[in-house]
Amino acid sequence: MVKGNIGRKLIHHTKNKVFDCPNRSLEFFSLNEGFTVNIDIDELGQAEYYCNICLPAEFDSIEGTVSFIDLDLDLLIDNSGDRKVVDEDEFISNSIAMNYPKETIDYARNSLSSLEQKILLKEFPFDGFFNYYIKKSL
């Protein structure tokens, strides 16, 4: 997990853009499952979640960096708990343009389904794990 401070820069390499982040954030990178979780925390402590479907993150202990390959699908959870899958169109067009193997497409779809189940069943890391860190970040 990584803490992001107000004003940090987010570099999106494939879109060739740099975003200024106006809120605190927590970033959770799974090293063995196909998702990441970005928790955007406003000044009142309200949290919104942005989950990337991706290949498992990799940690380079020598460089101190975390990286992952984004598979385009994203799941948003607003501060009222409503969920929405986004970038489905981007996933489809990129899977065609970049000739994703069937295994990669299946992996992305299964990872999204698994993530949704974790949220519904309140399994780690959606079992209250983030609550302490959200409060501590204020």
Image (cartoon, helix red, strand yellow):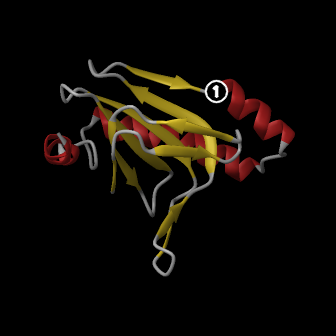
Callout 1 crowding tier (Cα within 10 Å): few <14, some 14–19, many ≥20 = few
Question: Which residue lies at the image location 40% right of the left edge and 41% below the top edge?
Answer: 38
Question: Which residue lies at the image location 51% right of the left edge and 25% below the top edge?
Answer: 85
Which image quarter is the N terminus in? bottom left
Q: Is residue 135 left or right of residue 116?
A: left
Q: Is residue 40 above or below residue 66?
A: above
Question: Residue 121, how many percent across, how many down?
Answer: 26, 37
Which residue is under mark 1?
Answer: 88
Question: Residue 31, how many percent across, how many down?
Answer: 44, 63
Q: Nearer the viewer, residue 77 or 67?
A: 67
Residue at the bottom extreme, as displayed: 62
Question: Which residue lies at the image location 34% right of the left edge and 18% below the top edge?
Answer: 82
Question: Which residue lies at the image location 17% right of the left edge and 42% below the top edge?
Answer: 128
Question: Residue 133, how many percent across, how many down?
Answer: 19, 48
Q: Amino acid at mark 1?
A: Glu
Q: Is residue 32 above or below residue 95?
A: below
Q: Is residue 121 left or right of residue 132?
A: right
Question: Residue 130, how many percent across, how many down?
Answer: 22, 45
Which image quarter is the C terminus in? top left
